[in-house]
Amino acid sequence: MKKTNGRWLVVVLLFVATTVNYMDRAILGIAGPSMMKDLSLTTVQFGLLGSAFFWSYALMQIPVGMIVDKLGARLTYSLAIVWWSLCTVFTGLGRSIGTLIGIRVLMGVGEAPAFPTNTRVISDWLPAHERGVANGIFNSGTAIGIGITTPFLAWIIEGWGWQTAFVVIGLVGFVWLGFWLFYFRNKPSESKIANAAEVTYIEAGQTETKNEPLNISPLKFLRFRNVWPMLYGLFAHNYLTYLMMTWLPTYLVVERHMTLLKAGFFTMLPWIMSFLGNILGGVLSDWLIRKGWNSIKARKTILSIGMLFPLFIIPTIYTQNAMSALIFISIAIGGEGLAAGILWATVSDISPKGAEGKLAGLQNFVGNLAGWLAPVVTGLLISKFNNFTIALIIPVVICIIASLAYSLIIKNQRISFNENQAKGTVAS
């Protein structure tokens, strides 16, 4: 019997969900000028509005990881996208800073399950040697949502106002929900899109032995040396991502003297490179696994290489040409995308089967603390020094440390817990 390819339809669904997830985040920055003018918001108030999402999003990561493992991906994602889509719609209806901040905090709660759920789905639906590509595909949705949809969102705002843009983007989530409920089941064996041959293929490529959720605290993962570079690595990736998501258009206008329209168009270039880097990182790591490499060794090799690419930000400080600076930034973000594409595949490789959501939640909690820091720290440094120099050097240093941590600290071994699930040991 020829096997079906239903697992890749599932990956496409995760990619679309991630794109919608980041569109819902990025639209606030695009609508910012119109919102500030219409609602008479100060820059301080708008800064608080921008950070409010991350207050709850980061804090919810550990509990949502446990929820994913308990409720399963199908129900968790369904509830999550309804929640965050409604919050996006209601943002377009908000008329005061207090109301808007409250909505954004609630939106952070709704979006919190997305990446832990993605990780669990990839672990359940993909054999180990295909997870790099699968993670690269779904994670590339971040680049699409942040940058490549920008002209579309700006067009809606320009033509029909910022309120309409929030409502339209919010409704997209409900369209996705219909496809998710129709096609997806928690296990390939329960789904109509995967035949027996594909189920056998998936199970044969899964090296894990446990399938039931592990009743352990996510904090117990902190006992293992492999976990610490993963937590810090996502923080480093997110610091660079959130800095660029928040400040890149302003950098091009203020520091490089581009017009706002031109800056908005060229802002897409780094995120196109990031999209390609995400896919390439997954392809390369999976290729190494097919060549016989240990899966963790393959992932950490690409992670270490990808985290060195932010070094290309340094030449932007010294070049006088705006396009040259943009090219260097695009290489940095695109190259770092090699790592971004497999950050979540590494969770599946290192975590015990049945605890992927918990470890993913812990990683996403630490990683999204960067959302609290990067925009604010960058703004303070720009205000103090009247340029972007120090602000651009910081993510470079952070990412280099992450590269060293991946290559020197992570062992090529999966985590396992003993029968009592109270004490951990490392097993190969």
Image (tube, rainbow, N blue to C red):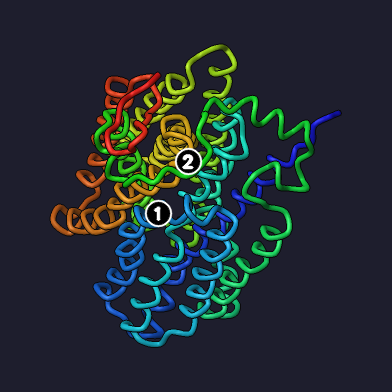
Q: Amino acid at mark 2?
A: Gly
Picture quadrant where residue 20 is located = bottom right
Q: Nearer the viewer, residue 138 or 239?
A: 138
Dot 1 or dot 2: first in sequence order is: 1
Please, is residue 258 above or below residue 316 in the view?
below
* Left or right: 385 as drawn, with respect to 341: left
Secondary structure, mark 2, is: loop
Numbered badge on residue 354: 2
- Rendered location of residue 29, percent (x, y): 42, 65
- Res. 312 image quadrant: top left
- The secondary element bearing badge 1 is classed as helix
Q: Residue at x 41, y 85 (%)?
A: 38
**Image location of residue 266, percent across then percent down:** 50, 50
Label 1 sits on residue: 245
Disc 1 versus disc 2: distance between alpha carbons?
A: 34 Å
Q: Position of residue 202 (x, y in %)?
A: 66, 31
Q: Nearer the viewer, residue 199 or 216?
A: 216
* Residue for point 40% across, 76% down: 103
Q: Vertically, is 372 above or below 398?
A: below
| Residue 95 shows up from this direction | yes
Q: Residue at x 75, y 41 (%)?
A: 194
> Which amino acid type is marked by label 1?
Met
Q: Quadrant of the C terminus?
A: top left
Quick check: 195 left or right of 114?
right
Q: How many discs mark residues in the rendered view?
A: 2
Classify residue 11 as left or right of residue 391: right
Q: Please state, as top left, top right, bottom left or bottom right, where the N terminus lies in the image.
A: top right
Horizontal and vertical percent position of residue 227? 31, 34
**For residue 183, side relative to residue 129 (left or right):** right
3 and 204: which one is in front? 204
